Image (cartoon, rainbow, N blue to C red):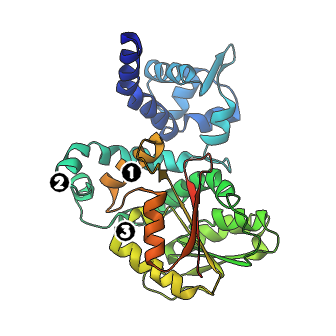
């Protein structure tokens, strides 16, 4: 690799957070929401949003450079990517995940050096509280709604790929544990006409989940039950799913949950796990390692290789464990009860 290539790589990493923060700020200020209605000049937009006109112009021009906005004689307008993913009213929006990243993850990552020194998450250091991560994200209705929207935006992208990574047509009832808005359950019922699904999550998630489920094309086949999957009995099903759940916890909690699921399944029942998989030789992919570092600053969990998930699942009694890449930021593992 040439010296120039080396420097470009490092310079790209140096400034990567700046691009994120420009997009985060534009979303947080409601710029893309305002421009979705019609193109606007910087001055008019600054007046509506109570912002400094010159400073806003600089931010808008940065968004043009990032290909999130287009500037022409009518003013600034959204690109198709901004309209699809950055406005709050889009069914595919990432706005919740962006706000969650900006308000929580960005602050936690500021203490990554201490996480590496001490080997523990940065929750108390960042927010001055020892409250568990989910207690914080569910601390009030507004925080709950934002976190649930964040997970839904990400899930809308990945769940259709997860449920098609394997042929699940032999299963008839899916129970998605910690299923939030039901994006995975909905995707499964859309992919498999003979499948019914139950979404299990905490009571504070229920009103939001029912809204999303009710607007889906498979609402009559998706139900919601309130429960804590660690503490409460699991609903009957021949297929359980855990979407971005196991990476939140240490091995002891995972062992307990997997044994509980195994005991609840009938023979030949399955467990579908959706997580970012690290290559077995730990050479990549980059997104899985970045998510692993995210887990280090946020939780007591981690990302794992397919081999590591296989060992956890087999220790709980599962067999026929198979992992598949989805092409998304979340991969799929299917394990069968003998």
Q: Report if the CB atoms under discs 3 and 2 are less than 8 Å apart.
A: no
> Residue 309: x, y in percent?
46, 64
Question: Relative to the observer, which residue lies in front, 299 or 311?
Answer: 311
- Circle 3 — which element? helix
- Work out whether mark 1 precedes mark 3 in sequence or the reverse, and give the earlier one: 3
- What's the CA distance linking mark 1 and mark 2? 16 Å
Who's the residue at 76% across and 71% down the image? 219
Q: Which quadrant is home to the C terminus? A: bottom right
> Residue 137: x, y in percent?
41, 62
> Residue 35: x, y in percent?
64, 32
Who's the residue at 47% across and 74% down the image? 314
Task: Spot the residue most to the right.
Answer: 193
Q: Which mark is residue 100?
A: none
Whether residue 175 appears in this view of the structure is yes
Question: Relative to the observer, which residue lies in front, 324 or 71?
Answer: 324
> According to the image, label 1 marks what residue?
292
> According to the image, label 2 marks what residue?
118
- Circle 2 — which element? helix
> According to the image, label 3 marks what residue?
135
The label nearer to you, 3 versus 2, is: 2
User: Could you classify mark 1 by the number of other residues whose Cα lies within 10 Å: few (under 14), some (14-19), or many (20 or more)?
Assistant: many
Seen in the picture, residue 229 relative to 49 is either above or below; the reply is below
Who's the residue at 50% across and 21% down the image? 62
């Amino acid at each position: 690799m040439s010296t120039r290539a080396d420097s470009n790589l490092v310079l790209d990493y140096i400034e990567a957070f700046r691009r994120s923060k420009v997009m985060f700020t534009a979303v947080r200020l409601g710029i893309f929401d305002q421009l979705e209605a019609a193109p606007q000049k910087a001055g008019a937009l600054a007046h509506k949003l109570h912002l400094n006109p010159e400073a806003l112009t600089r931010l808008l021009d940065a968004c043009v450079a990032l290909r999130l906005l287009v500037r022409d004689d009518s003013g600034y307008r959204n690109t198709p990517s901004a309209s699809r993913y950055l406005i709050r009213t889009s069914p595919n929006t990432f706005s919740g995940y962006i706000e969650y990243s900006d308000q929580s993850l960005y602050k936690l990552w500021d203490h990554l050096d201490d996480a590496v020194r001490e080997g523990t998450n940065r929750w108390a250091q960042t927010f001055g509280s020892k409250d568990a991560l989910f207690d914080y994200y569910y601390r009030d209705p507004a925080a709950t709604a934002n976190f649930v929207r964040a997970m839904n935006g990400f899930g809308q992208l990945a769940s259709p790929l997860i449920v098609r990574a394997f042929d699940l047509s032999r299963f008839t009832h899916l129970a998605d544990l910690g299923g939030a808005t039901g994006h995975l359950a909905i995707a499964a019922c859309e992919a498999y006409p003979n499948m019914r699904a139950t979404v299990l999550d905490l009571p504070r998630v229920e009103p939001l989940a029912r809204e999303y489920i009710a607007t889906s094309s498979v609402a009559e086949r998706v139900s919601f039950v309130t429960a804590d999957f660690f503490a409460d009995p699991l609903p009957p099903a021949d297929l359980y799913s855990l979407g971005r759940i196991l990476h939140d916890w240490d091995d002891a909690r995972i062992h307990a949950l997997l044994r509980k699921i195994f005991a609840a399944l009938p023979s030949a029942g399955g467990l579908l796990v959706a997580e970012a998989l690290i290559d077995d030789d730990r050479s990549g992919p980059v997104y899985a390692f970045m998510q692993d570092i995210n887990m280090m600053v946020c939780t007591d969990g981690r990302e794992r290789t397919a081999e590591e998930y296989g060992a956890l699942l087999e220790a709980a009694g599962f067999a026929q464990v198979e992992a598949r890449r989805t092409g998304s930021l979340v991969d799929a593992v299917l394990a069968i009860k003998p």
